[in-house]
Image (cartoon, grey):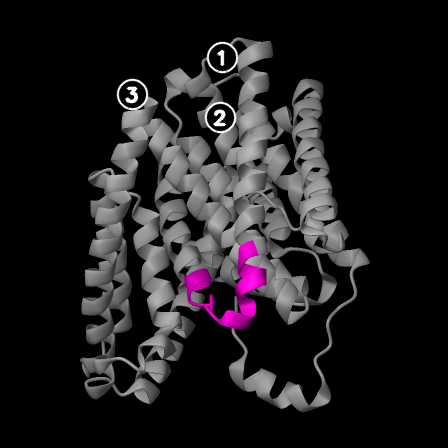
Amino acid sequence: MTNYIILALCVIVILSYLFDISGRYSKIPSVIFLIILGIGLQILVRTLHLEIPDLKPVLPVIGTLGLIMIVMEASLDLRLEKRKKLLIIKSVTSAFVLFAVFSGAMAFILTEFFGSSLRSSLLNAIPLGIISSSVAITSAAHLKPDQKEFVVYESSFSDIFGIIIFDFILITQGSIGLGILDMGVKSIITIIIALVTTSILAILLHKTTYHINYVIIMTSVIMVYVLAKLSHLPALLLVLIFGLVLSNNQLLESSPIKKYVDFTKFRSDIKSFKVILTELTFLVRSFFFIMFGFYAKIDGLFDLNNLITGVSVIAGVFLLRLLFFRQVLKMKLIPLAFFSPRGLITILLFLSIPEVSRISLINEEVVTLIILFSIFMLMAGNLVSVRYKPPAEEKSAGFENADVH
């Protein structure tokens, strides 16, 4: 039995790798294949009457690890440069406004028309308003550089805003005003802790010569994240700051730190760290979506009420997005208007909603349908967009600097 399990895991990893490669050329997000693979495995297990241990409780653990790694990986791609000022403003504005308007509108509907409390409505609406960076970033590989950067910034900050506000609503029981003040104080504390932690880990990354290095750094980041969560601090902010400081180390070259840091070696260390991080993120993300598909309730996916709810939510998401891009950002609709997938964070936050705050209208099957529909919309945007082809003189450099997502 042991050999069969190892063989099955190897086959799953190889299939995930093939899905990832095919997604880059077919413009079909690999997440779709991973979820379908999970559903297929579920049908196979049922048909053969195989006994599989219940691993569903492990899903939030894998999801949390994936969330930390995805945000860390995405933040390592973020460059704070003056020439990108307008792009950053537009992407961050889009992330916050679209998230806030959709979540607010959804919460209003759930409160006014379905009789749910405001707190429960917000907790159920927020996960549906967050763009999944794990899906969006990996699906943006063929886009033009400025479009890809927009996707990275928008989806990353959508994750940050969504999780911080979700945690705020989940934790806050009393006055909203005191809750906001408390969150502001905790955010300042988090930033200070993040800067201190980042300094220590950066020194460890740069100065340590022992052959086991990167795994300890990632483990330390995860440990600090968990400790911050246990202390009710906006933990994801720690991860974001860690990645931003490392990816924008050129801003520190003119500071006194230059005397103690060999920035050429430091950048080489960061590049090696990112390669390891990308590999681990691929594994965690793959197993998460396969397990999600495996434990999806297939029968409920074809329920008429669930289909109507899922289609209505997706219609609202993309109608709002189309209007915002056309009227406010004044940007071309194709393909960026379609890059609003839901995914890992939607699932993770939905599983974090207390049972007492669950709303029957927004059930597990509806969340699954919304994720699938949003990814299909992304795929449609990919298919109608023109693949970006870098100039001939940039191709050789592109191979040297290519990152695997």
- The image shows residue 342, relative to residue 192, as above or below, that is above
Q: Residue at x 26, y 80 (%)?
A: 255
- The image shows residue 280, relative to residue 292, as above or below, that is below
- Determine whether the residue tagged by mark 2 lies in a helix, strand or loop: helix
Residue 116 image label: 1
Mark with earlier residue (1, 2)? 1
In this rendering, position of residue 204 left or right of residue 109: left
In magenta segment, residue 74: yes
Crowdedness near tag 2: few (<14), some (14–19) or many (≥20) residues, C-alpha within 10 Å: many
Q: Residue at x 40, y 34 (%)?
A: 166
In contact (CB < 8 Å): disc 1 and disc 2: yes
The residues tagged by marks 1 and 3 sit, at their Cα atoms, a distance apart of 16 Å
Mark with earlier residue (1, 3)? 1
Residue furthest to the right: 384
Q: Quadrant of residue 178?
A: top left
Closer to the camera in the image, 216 or 10: 216
Q: Residue 218 in the image: x percent, y percent?
A: 29, 63
Q: Residue at x 27, y 88 (%)?
A: 262
Q: Label 1 sits on what residue type?
A: Ser
Q: Quadrant of residue 280?
A: bottom left
Crowdedness near tag 3: few (<14), some (14–19) or many (≥20) residues, C-alpha within 10 Å: few
The residues tagged by marks 1 and 2 sit, at their Cα atoms, a distance apart of 10 Å
Q: Residue 44 in the image: x percent, y percent?
A: 58, 41
Q: Label 3 sits on what residue type?
A: Gln
State the predominant SS element of the stretch in magenta.
helix
Residue 124 image label: 2
- The image shows residue 314, relative to residue 131, as above or below, that is above
Kindly identify which residue carries mark 3.
Answer: 173
User: Which mark is in front, 1 or 3?
Assistant: 3
What residue range appears in magenta? 73-89
